[in-house]
Each structure stands twice: as C-alpha cells, then as structure tokens.
C-alpha cells in the first residue's frame, strides 16, 4: 500500500493538468466540440530565465552643424556672420547717397569681389571682435572704407592703420606711439582701441549711423549738429543732422551701401567670394626673449616678410623691450606651437 501512493499521486496530478482549454471564440450550437488541448507540464524546479536587457541604440542628432576648421575658413562663413547681424532693410536705408555708393561699388563687380577676397583674413578677425563686444556688425565694414583692410595704410594728414586713427584719438584710447613702434599700425592694438572708442560713441549716440558720423567727424561736432536739427535722422541719407561735411554724410552712405551689397548681392549683380579659402588670424603674445618679428617667424617656420606685413607696428620688425608684444599670426603657426611633441623613439 505504501509503494502505491507515489504512483497514485502522480496519476492525480497528471489528470489535473489535462483539463480542456476553451478556445477564445464563440462556436455555433451545431459546430462540433473542439478536442481538449493538454497544457504542457511545467517542472516545479525549473529556474526562471529573465529576458536580456534591451540594447539602446546610440542617438545621432539630426542636422548636426559641421565644426568650423580652426585654421582655415571660407568667405561664406564671414559673410553669413555679417549678414545675420546687419540691421534689417539695409538696401532700403540711406536714400540717394547710399544708392549712389552702391552703384559705384558695383560698377566693377570683379574688382569689388577681389578686394573683399583679399580682406577676408582680417575681416574674419575684426568681425569676430565686433560681435564679441556686441557692437553693430556694420562696424566691421569701417576698415574697408578707411584703409581697404591694409594694416600699414597712412592717410593724408596723418590718420594711420586699419582704422585710420589720428594720434590724439589713438593715445586717448590706450594706443602706444613712440620711437620704433606705432600701435595704430598693429591690427590687434588698433582694433581694440577703435572698438573701445566706437563702444563709447554708441552709448552716446544710440544708433550706429550717428555713431559712425561721430567716429568720422568727432563726437562734439556731431552732438552740436544733432542739437541744432533734432528732427533729422542720420540714417535717412538726407544730410541730417545739418551742418556737417559731405564727407561725413558719404561715410554713412558708404557703410549702408556695403551692408546692402553683402546682405543682397544679387540685387547689384555682385558675386561675393563665398568659396574663397583663407587662413585665420589669431592673437599671440611674443615671449620676452623675442627681439624681432623675423626671429619669431624663423622659429615657427613661416615667412618673416608676410608676418612683418601683417604687423607693421614694429619699425624694421624690431621688438624692443617695453613695447607691446601682441601680434597677429596665421593660425597654422599657432597650431604648430600647441602641437604635441613627438613620442621618444624606443631603444
């Protein structure tokens, strides 16, 4: 009797597991009854197996912007930067004066585009500085009018450098001028001082057309003219405020014309040098042991003549003690300076 109990329990368990499973459909009365389906037996001792965790796919951001090349740029990048920040409606501003200058600039489209192309390295540098200081993008076009973006330009009567600053204004804004060195000829020093001056004028004048009038004619003269004719808008191109030199009215008109040609070049049949490749210019402070531009250029394996042309503030290229030591250098030279040293060879 004791030996039969396990067999009897096994039969009872098997019978319990073989109950019929009703299908999840309705059947008509005349339909034959489905055959009972036995449920599979599950071993009590079988361990549970957890499903594998889902594998997450890496998320790829859509429309990722390409990283700008730190050494080389394209004209398209510079003009897009300016176009985004220029005052809207550039081609509708300035009236007859701006229209006249648009026609003059666009009279020779090939020469106009060539001049822009040659200015790209310094225009890239200056436009970055202008927008970094949150100043109107039109200010980056001032060196085109003043010097054609030539660092060594010297005008009639003494205005000097990219920004054509006179000595008194330059000194008032921190530029050093002494024997063997003229900071107005330094792209770094002159740009820093010019933007500081324009920032001060912008706080006085409000809108950029009045600001550049003051840059050209002097803030006291422009403020007096504005007081005499407050009804005039310096942006409308109709010789407002009254009493200033025509050179000053043309100064605003030229900037308005250039802004229009950059914002909408197709209106004048201009093809901007969008695909022109240029090397970026970066600021660098010379080490104290550097005594000439040529010495630094030889260390970096770059052209001393080109570096002197870019930094003409040092007479004969000599960097004496006590002179400012900030210069512009091609980005490739900077890349060489920060490049990791080669690993030592194994014995």
Image (cartoon, rainbow, N blue to C red):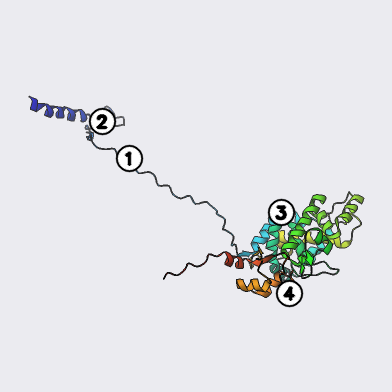
Residue at mark 2: 21
State the residue in front, 312 or 227: 312
Q: Residues within 10 Å of mark 4 (few under 14, many from 20)?
A: few
Q: Residues within 10 Å of mark 2 (few under 14, many from 20)?
A: few
Q: Position of residue 306 (x, y in %)?
A: 68, 73
Name the side, left or right, on which 276 lies relative to 150.
left
Asked if residue 28 is positioned above or below residue 91 in the image, the reply reads above
The mark closer to the camera, 4 or 1, is 4
Distance Cα–Cα, label 2 vs label 4: 103 Å
In the picture, residue 102 is in which quadrant? bottom right
Which corner quadrant holds the C terminus?
Answer: bottom left
Which badge, 4 or 1, comes first in the chain's sequence? 1
Residue at mark 1: 50
Distance Cα–Cα, label 3 vs label 4: 33 Å
In the picture, residue 127 is in which quadrant? bottom right
Q: Residues within 10 Å of mark 3 (few under 14, many from 20)?
A: few
The mark closer to the camera, 2 or 3, is 3
Q: Position of residue 83 (x, y in %)?
A: 69, 57
Residue at mark 3: 133
Distance Cα–Cα, label 2 vs label 1: 27 Å
The mark closer to the camera, 2 or 1, is 1
Residue at mark 4: 316
Q: Element type at marker 4?
A: helix
């Amino acid at each position: 009797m004791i030996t039969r109990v396990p067999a009897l329990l096994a039969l009872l368990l098997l019978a319990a597991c073989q109950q019929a499973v009703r299908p999840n459909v309705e059947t008509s009365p005349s339909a034959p009854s489905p055959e009972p389906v036995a449920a599979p037996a599950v071993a009590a001792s079988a361990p549970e197996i957890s499903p594998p965790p889902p594998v997450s796919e890496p998320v790829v951001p859509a429309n990722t912007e390409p990283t700008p090349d730190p050494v080389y740029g394209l004209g398209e990048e510079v003009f897009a930067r300016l176009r985004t920040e220029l005052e809207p409606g550039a081609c509708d501003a300035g009236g007859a004066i701006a229209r006249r200058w648009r026609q003059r600039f666009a009279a020779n489209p090939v020469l106009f585009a060539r001049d822009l192309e040659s200015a790209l390295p310094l225009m890239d540098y200056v436009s970055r500085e202008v927008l970094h200081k949150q100043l109107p993008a039109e200010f980056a076009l001032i060196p085109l009018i003043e010097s054609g973006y030539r660092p060594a330009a010297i005008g009639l009567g003494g205005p000097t450098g990219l920004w054509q600053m006179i000595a008194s204004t330059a000194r008032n804004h921190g530029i050093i001028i002494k024997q063997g060195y003229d900071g107005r000829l330094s792209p770094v020093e002159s740009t820093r001082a010019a933007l500081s001056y324009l920032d001060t004028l912008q706080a006085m004048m409000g809108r950029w057309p009045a600001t550049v009038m003051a840059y050209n004619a002097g803030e006291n003269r422009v403020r007096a003219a504005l007081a005499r004719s407050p009804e005039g808008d310096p942006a409308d191109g109709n010789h407002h405020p009254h009493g200033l030199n025509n050179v000053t009215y043309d100064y605003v008109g030229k900037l308005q014309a250039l802004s229009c040609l950059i914002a909408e070049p197709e209106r004048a049949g201009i093809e901007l040098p969008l695909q022109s490749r240029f090397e970026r210019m970066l600021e660098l402070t010379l080490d104290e042991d550097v005594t000439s531009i040529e010495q630094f250029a030889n260390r970096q394996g770059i052209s001393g003549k080109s570096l002197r042309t870019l930094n003409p503030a040092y007479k004969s290229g000599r960097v004496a003690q006590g002179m400012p030591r900030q210069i512009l250098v091609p980005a490739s030279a900077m890349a060489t300076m920060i490049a990791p040293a080669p690993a030592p060879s194994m014995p």
